Image: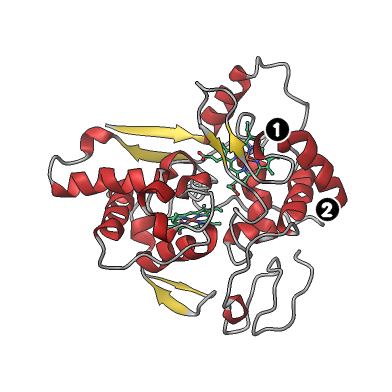
Amino acid sequence: MIRFVTATLFAASACRADGGGALPEVARPAPATASLRIREDSLIPRDPVGAAIRRGRAILAATADSLPANVGNALRCTSCHLRDGTTTDAAPWVGVYSRFPQYRSRNAKVNQIQDRINDCFQRSLNGKALAWDSPDMAAIVAYLAFLSRGVAPPGDVPGQGFRKMEPLRPDTAHGRLVYAGQCARCHGGDGQGMTNPDPTGSPRYYPPVFGPRSFNVGAGMARLRTAASFVRFNMPFDRPGTITDQDAFDVAGYLVTRPRPDFVGKEHDWPKGDPPPDVAYSTPAGPAKAPR
Ligand code: HEC
Ligand code: HEC
């Protein structure tokens, strides 16, 4: 009843789709030990909770169509939480419901899962918080709880969040070349995104990675280490795991220094003065430094 998905499976299928030998010879990710337990749709109950679970999953994959007033850019939740939040090393939602309430240093408070969801609405989707008591919030929480139920007590799963990497100094000028060579074919020369030119292709849409329709400067993905790890293990979408650690940091360095929407109030982040070293803006700890 429970499907096991490993990062190696994704890598292997990417190689097959590519014809195998055409891949550049670069270091591959360490063999994945991560394996997520994905609960099958047959476990979704046939009752109002089940209807909410399905509605929640639909909102997360078609966020702007479902909630136009809450989305301020051209991304959807699953632009980063890949494949409905079931992908290792892409901040999977499997187990996430059991990881809240949780203390977060960014606001120095105990956060509930609704706070975390709204953080991504306001920063990653550059939009507006969803009312806690709305049926749509209940639906999103119902889907995250469904993915989490029974799979990972007390909540930590392998492949959770983003994979830790040894931080490298980014060469942003080289990152620009990596972007032009490996990313622009899907995300566009100006980072603006595009519709998949293959009408039968999936996904149908490649989201903007910088510029006015992308995530804002306060988003987690606007941090060097987060972007580098996401890109290293998930991009290019059709050949994940084929770029080097250094190229991932270089292209991440390029992405996080491109223009993107501002986030009003970011100067209050990490009020206890403990920002991570890859935050690019001023906080109560002091003025902005080059992210590292
Ligand atoms: C631009 C990329 C991006 C988009 C789009 C995005 N997120 Fe996130 N999300 C992140 C990052 C980065 C994190 C932090 C993960 C970490 O550091 O472990 C995160 C974390 C989360 C978490 C906590 C995960 C955990 O393991 O603790 C939840 C829940 C979440 N996001 C929900 C959403 C929802 C709901 C949406 C749509 C409204 C959304 N996200 C859109 C990047 C994104
Ligand atoms: C084959 C097309 C393709 C290529 C090439 C590609 N991506 Fe992506 N990328 C995608 C798709 C598709 C998504 C969103 C997945 C979804 O919506 O299901 C995405 C999502 C992203 C995101 C998170 C969402 C956002 O818009 O910010 C970032 C960041 C990103 N890609 C960076 C890169 C970088 C850097 C490269 C080059 C190393 C790259 N991508 C190459 C297709 C591609």
Of callouts 1 and 2, the N-terminal one: 2
Q: Tell me the tag on residue 172.
A: 2
Quarter holding residue 156: bottom left
In which quadrant will I find the N terminus? top left
**Residue 117 as seen in the image, left or right of residue 133:** right
| Residue 135, x across and y down, in percent | 24, 58
Residue type of the residue flagged with mark 1: Arg
Which residue position is annotated with label 1?
Answer: 185
* Label 2 crowd bin: few (<14), some (14–19), many (20+), radius 10 Å: some
- Percent position of residue 246, x then y: 79, 46
Check disc 1: other Cα within 10 Å, few if <14, some if 14-19, many if 20+.
Answer: some
Residue 113 screen position, x and y as percent: 36, 64
Mark 1 CB lies closer than 8 A to ligand 2: yes
Percent position of residue 173, x then y: 87, 50
In the picture, the disc for residue 144 is: none
Between disc 1 and disc 2, the foreground one is 1
